[in-house]
Image (cartoon, rainbow, N blue to C red):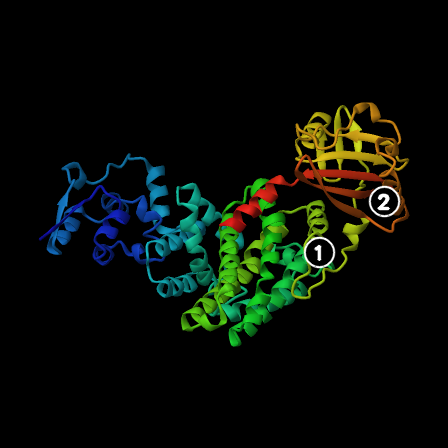
Amino acid sequence: MMKTINLHNTVYDLVRTAPELKGILHDLGFTELTAPGMLETAGQRMTILKGARLKGIEVPVIVQTLRDNGFEVSGLTDADSQPEPMDSCPDQKTADAASFQKIPRIELLKGYLTRLKTGDDLSEIRNEFVREFQDVDASEIMHAEQELMAQGTPLQEVQRLCDLHSALFHGATRAEKLARAEEAVQQSLADRNQGLETAASGSSRKEQAARLMHTEGHPLQTFTRENEALTEKILEAGMHPGPSRLAELRDTAVHYAKKGDLLYPLLKVKYGISGPSDVMWTVDDEIRDTLAALDQVLVQDRNAHWETQVEAVLQRMKEMIYKEQNILFPITAQHFTESEWQQIYRDSRQYPVIFQVTPATWKEAEADRPSDVSVLSEGVVRMHGGTLSVQELTAMLDTLPLELTFVDAADINRYFNEGPEMKAFKRPLASLGRKVYSCHPPKVEPMVRHIIREFRNGTRDEVAVWAEKGGRPMYVRYLAARSKSGEYLGTLEAVQDMTFAKEHFLRNTQS
């Protein structure tokens, strides 16, 4: 049975329907079709008829050759067999010919990703890629991912490509000619050190990243040292995949959390670089969840299938290290400002130390630390943690499911929030401006004085008391409020109705 093809359809669509057409068209003179990525790029804009005009191939010859190979030709008109008029749009013809002869590297990269998506053999594509490219820049990978998503490719599909095209890029990056991911990680770290010694500062993304990685205390230095330590632990876990080794790897979640909190959002929101951020973030979460699930498997149930899963997640972790060092970090080095890096450095202090990699002190960031002094102007309160209008700040404090009282350093009642509608402890506004002791009965006053005295002396920072009020369990906390330098500023009382917690645990106990 003969196949019918329409000469007005794109070459890409025709070849995907009938793959044997690729060889037939090549023999007819469409030799560019076998070049890597050509079919997926120019082939999606080129028809056989348009290509025949550009290549000077007679249409009747094409038609006869197709029929000889078992194809029925449709869509052909008398005009299609006529030579193209001399006055046909020369600019467009030149542009079409150029696009058929030479494809921008970004289009070729997208073509490779498209082929991976449609199931073409990875090893074959890798060989073509290595043959055609001497190096590849991180920004080209980034733009390829973003354009795929902009053209409607779901994030989930791009994410599935992430590990595949990472393996593909391993073989073609200038700094990396090794196929195995383990060797790729080691080589990329070695090349980073060599690149800093030989390159002019700031002359490329990777050189910028290398400079920051060698800046004592810089966040990229800390990230890189964590990756170096993680690489060793991955190798150890691969050789001895026992419970303790796997548990150690779960600290990777902190490393991924820092990327997710400090790097990805800034790239995506401020600089519009969403492709690698979204894709890598998804892979981070999957690796973290897989490690947690594997760690929960009982020792007696850790069979060959479990070991295969461990090997797979270790491979993904090695791939992620490579992508961070060669794609993510160079991109951040190129875009982030000095002040943004300093803020990332300060925010990084919130996270625990992992893999025994204690962050060094970045002297420039410490010297340029912003003032913690809060400022009130035109109804706006500017604080270290952000900016709120007085109305927003009031609403926020009143929305908290807590009854709050603040007593200043002179033991004067200064503030009550509105708190829950039904308050456990009544706090008349008339008591504001008075000593806190006047609000407590004589038998309680000594205890209040004792707590505040210890807060002021610095011997205690918190006192917690459980009480019952109207049949409801109440959790009362007294907290010392201090400045950054440790100066006592006052006492905060926070009262929380814990009925919801009591009911929750009773339900679980009964069930």
Question: Mark 2 = which residue?
Answer: 451
Left or right position of 142 against 334: left
Indicate the amino acid at tag 2: Ile
Q: Residue 277: tell me if it is visible.
A: no
The percent position of residue 72, horizontal first and vertical second, equals: 12, 48
Residue 305 is situated, as x and y percent measured from the top left of the image, at: 41, 70
Identify the amino acid type marked 1: His
Label 2: few (<14), some (14–19) or many (≥20) C-alpha neighbours in 10 Å: many
Check the image and name the residue furthest to the left: 1
Task: Find disc 1 in the rendering and name its residue.
Answer: 218
Secondary structure of the residue carrying numbered label 1: loop
Q: Place residue 377 in its image quadrant.
A: top right
Q: Position of 322 compared to 17: left or right? A: right
Crowd rating for badge 1 (residues with CA inside 10 Å; few <14, some 14–19, many 20+)? many
Residue nearest the observer in this picture, 242 or 66: 242
Q: Is 394 left or right of 304, judged from the image as shown? A: right
Residue at left 66%, top 38%? 472
Q: Which residue corresponds to the image point at 42% horizontal and 49% vertical from the top-left?
A: 156
Q: Is residue 107 above or below residue 229?
A: above
Relative to 390, is 259 above or below?
A: below
**How far across and down, in percent of the image, does residue 408 sit?**
86, 35
In this rendered view, identify the residue nearer to me: 89 or 131: 131
Name which residue lies at 70% across and 25% down: 391
